[in-house]
Amino acid sequence: MDVLSKGQRLPLANLVPAGVLDIGVAVQGLALDFACFGLDGAGKLSDERYMTFFNQPRTPCGSVEVRTASGGDHAAFAFQLPRLPAGIERIVVAASIDGAAVMSQMASGYLRLLAGGHEVARFAFAAADFAQEKAVMLGELYRKDGAWRFMAVGQGFNGGLDALVRHFGGEVAPAMAHVSAPAKIDLEKRVAREAPQLVSLVKQAAVSLEKVGLSQHRAKVCLCLDISGSMGRLYKEGLVQQFAERILALGCKFDDDGEIDVFLFGKDVHQPDPMDLSNCTTYVKRVIQLHPLEGDTRYGKAMQAIRAFYFPDAKGQERTRPLKADMPVYVMFVTDGGTSDQATTEKQLRWASNEAIFWQFMGIGKGRKSKSKFLAAFADSDFPFLEKLDELGGRLIDNANYFSVGSPDEHSDAELYDLLMTEYPDWLKLARQHGLLA
């Protein structure tokens, strides 16, 4: 076990090669609150959802999570570093006092790193290390040359939590009770600063949402991309990248975290880091390098993974009763062919109808354009199964919509966003009526 002193740095590659570790903290003689701050490259808290503490115990991507303390620890955090968005460069573990006490009144304390349940490093501190501070940065995980490292910090702040939050670029509410998250960052300013190519897309998405009365609507957005071999040309020509940016812009209107979750599917299912404002420019190229195109196409397997991620209690399996959620999930499901697991896909869609999740399927290829069943019978289609799903029976409510395009860029931005809102507003009404949304 490594015993660390203030300012000492420790490479984590050999200790935790998979990037999965726990941090336990304890302080004797004082009652402290503990939190983790996920910071961007400028050392700022550009997304308040990456402040992790007892009132907000998990980051959106699940990379940092509050855990039940054990082994003498007073607080514990679990980390899955590979899941962090590329825009998060540092994670600071901090402690603060709620009351009149100061850090010099403690007896002693420590921060320890654990891998596989075994302690691998410890940083100890004591009252003599502090004076009138009411908050302290204890330790920091940070990226360097593509690898994660840890540094023992022990830096105090006389102003307490307020000073710490301001140091990280956040705004403190006038009456900041106990430990509360900093005020939300202005997302429009972030888009203009970090991804200016999305500015017009975000504005156009806003216009389409206004038309259907959803200008203030909040939802999580998920992009599910087919990575079967037949999609190769679309990836190579940048058409998938362009489409992904359009969906990210929609996500910026539906949620204020500036990111969307992404799933890839072929024979297997993969969940790369979320696509966000800091990594969007080269996002698709990067994830395809990490997850090359595969044989086979399995809708059902992808749907199960997505359901398990957003509603983990059922692990993507059967659900027979409505589950109420605070926020819906909008899934943009993109494919250029049929699936080899049709029976599984039908089950997944039926089970998912008891959850607050809407599936917008888009087929890239030849589809039936006519709504007339008589005329449609004489038309060819690459997506007869998706057309069947659109009308699938045995569901609590209609939780899916389908359309086809010859190419991902077939529609203008305005046309696309209007198309994406064809059935979603009606689904929201049904979801509330059937107890799926609070």
Image (spheres, rainbow, N blue to C red):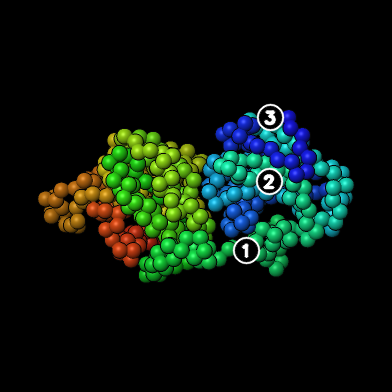
Q: Position of residue 172 (x, y in %)?
A: 68, 64
Residue 403 quadrant: bottom left
Residue 373 quadrant: bottom left
Amino acid type at circle 1 is Ala
Amino acid type at circle 3 is His
- Label drawn at residue 140: 2
Q: Residues within 10 Å of mark 1 (few under 14, many from 20)?
A: few
Q: Position of residue 161 (x, y in %)?
A: 74, 58
Dot 3 or dot 1: first in sequence order is 3
Taking 53 as reference, is 111 above or below it?
A: above
SS of the residue at dot 3?
strand
- Label drawn at residue 70: none
Residue beneath the point at 21% across and 51% down: 367
Residue beneath the point at 53% across and 48% down: 85
Dot 2 or dot 3: first in sequence order is 3
Q: Position of residue 34 (x, y in %)?
A: 72, 49
Residue annotated with mark 3: 118
In three-dimensional space, the C-alpha distance between marks 2 and 3, rounded to whole angstroms, equals: 19 Å
Amino acid type at circle 2 is Glu
SS of the residue at dot 2?
strand
Total marks drawn?
A: 3
Q: Is residue 352 left or right of residue 176?
A: left
Q: Is residue 124 left or right of residue 48?
A: right
Q: Residues within 10 Å of mark 3 (few under 14, many from 20)?
A: few
